[in-house]
């Protein structure tokens, strides 16, 4: 049971971080940013720049962790802010459907840029190899990385919650999420708030890329796709625009995936995701506004 619990928390942490990154942007701009998964991939491939495979492995493997982690977070934040300045700023007054299509287009641009530089073949990287050592907690064995992922996610969620609720910038973000037009009339600087939300979202994408890179030992241009899909689903069932709902739904999806992988008979396990998505449909049938609807929101999913 402890092993299942740790696995569920570890997978749920990834989904919660991804859902939080999407919910931050949606709360401020009503934009579902489907390029988020490609930001995750780009953040890992930034460690491989400029270069041949040999240089890439040396660079990723020998950069000290206290430089590597801030570097990857900064890459994710920087790319997200750049995408807001170059792309999304021009669509602020467009319909949500138009902005969503723009995010798809941006995601393809990032993906094919990586494809042009690195090809489609996954690259081997040695990212924080010391974290692969197993540790034993109350009889359950788990990689050290899994434990650090859970603890780091909890710390990041608490820090972000304090930031959003206790700082002036966080207050401006929440005001913009409630009523963007009124917030601007009351003196909230739109560009600053939106860029801050994109920076936080990109940094969360960078955190996910570090976890995925360390877990798999590979950099793949498709590596953010699966996390992005589950994170988007978590954002929807948590309640569009609700940060708390996105985090809760992310952990619930992780728990559901791990529990079903454990309890389903072996012949049914390849269809685990079908059962998870079926549960999502049931949730939306009974709670179309999501588990925790954002305050002031009446729209149904």
Image: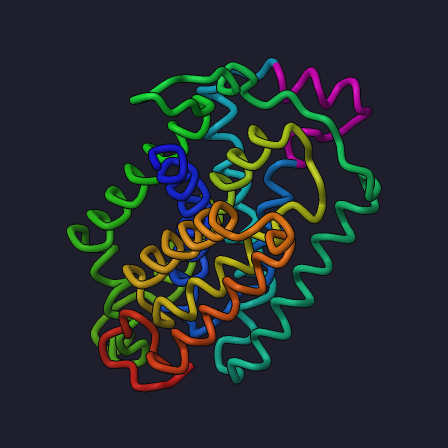
Q: Residue at x 43, y 74 (%)?
A: 30
- Residue 227 versus residue 215 in the image, above or below: below
The foreground one among 193 and 20 is 20
166 left or right, relative to 56? left
Residues in magenta?
A: 45-61
Q: Position of residue 115 (x, y in %)?
A: 80, 46
> Considering the image in quadrants, where does the N terminus appear?
top left
Name the quadrant of the C terminus.
Answer: bottom left
Q: State the residue in front, 292 or 268.
A: 268
Q: Where is residue 141, by image quadrant? A: top left
Q: Is residue 79 above or below residue 3?
A: below
- Spot occupied by residue 92 in the image (x, y as percentages of width and height): 49, 76
Say which residue appears at 56% left-offset and 37% top-offset: 212
Going by the image, does 130 lie left or right of 26? right
79, 61: nearer the viewer: 61
In the displayed orientation, state which residue is furthest to the left.
166
* Residue at 24% across, 54% down: 164
Is residue 200 visible in the rendered image? The answer is no
């Amino acid at each position: 049971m402890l092993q299942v619990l740790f696995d569920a928390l570890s997978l749920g942490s990834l989904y919660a971080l991804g859902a939080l990154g999407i919910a931050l942007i949606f709360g401020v701009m009503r934009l579902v940013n489907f390029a988020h998964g490609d930001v995750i991939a780009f953040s890992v491939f930034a460690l491989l720049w400029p270069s041949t495979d040999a240089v890439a492995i040396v660079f990723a493997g020998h950069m000290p962790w206290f430089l590597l982690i801030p570097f990857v977070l900064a890459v994710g934040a920087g790319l997200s802010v750049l995408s807001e300045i170059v792309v999304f700023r021009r669509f602020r007054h467009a319909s949500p459907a138009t902005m969503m299509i723009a995010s798809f287009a941006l995601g393809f641009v990032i993906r094919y840029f990586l494809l042009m530089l690195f090809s489609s073949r996954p690259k081997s990287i040695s990212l924080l190899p010391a974290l692969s050592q197993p540790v034993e907690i109350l009889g359950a064995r788990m990689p050290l990385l899994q434990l650090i992922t859970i603890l780091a996610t909890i710390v990041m969620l608490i820090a972000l919650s304090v930031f959003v609720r206790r700082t002036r910038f966080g207050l401006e973000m929440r005001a913009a999420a409630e009523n963007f037009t009124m917030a601007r009339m009351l003196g909230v600087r739109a560009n600053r708030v939106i860029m801050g939300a994109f920076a936080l979202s990109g940094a969360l994408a960078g955190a996910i890329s570090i976890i995925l890179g360390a877990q798999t030992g590979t950099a793949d241009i498709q590596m953010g796709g699966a996390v992005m899909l589950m994170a988007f689903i978590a954002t929807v069932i948590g309640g569009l625009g609700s940060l708390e709902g996105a985090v809760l739904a992310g952990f619930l999806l992780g728990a559901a995936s791990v529990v079903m992988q454990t309890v389903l008979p072996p012949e049914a396990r390849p269809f685990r995701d079908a059962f998870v998505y079926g549960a999502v449909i049931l949730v939306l049938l009974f709670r179309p506004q999501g588990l925790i609807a954002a305050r002031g929101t009446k729209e149904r999913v």
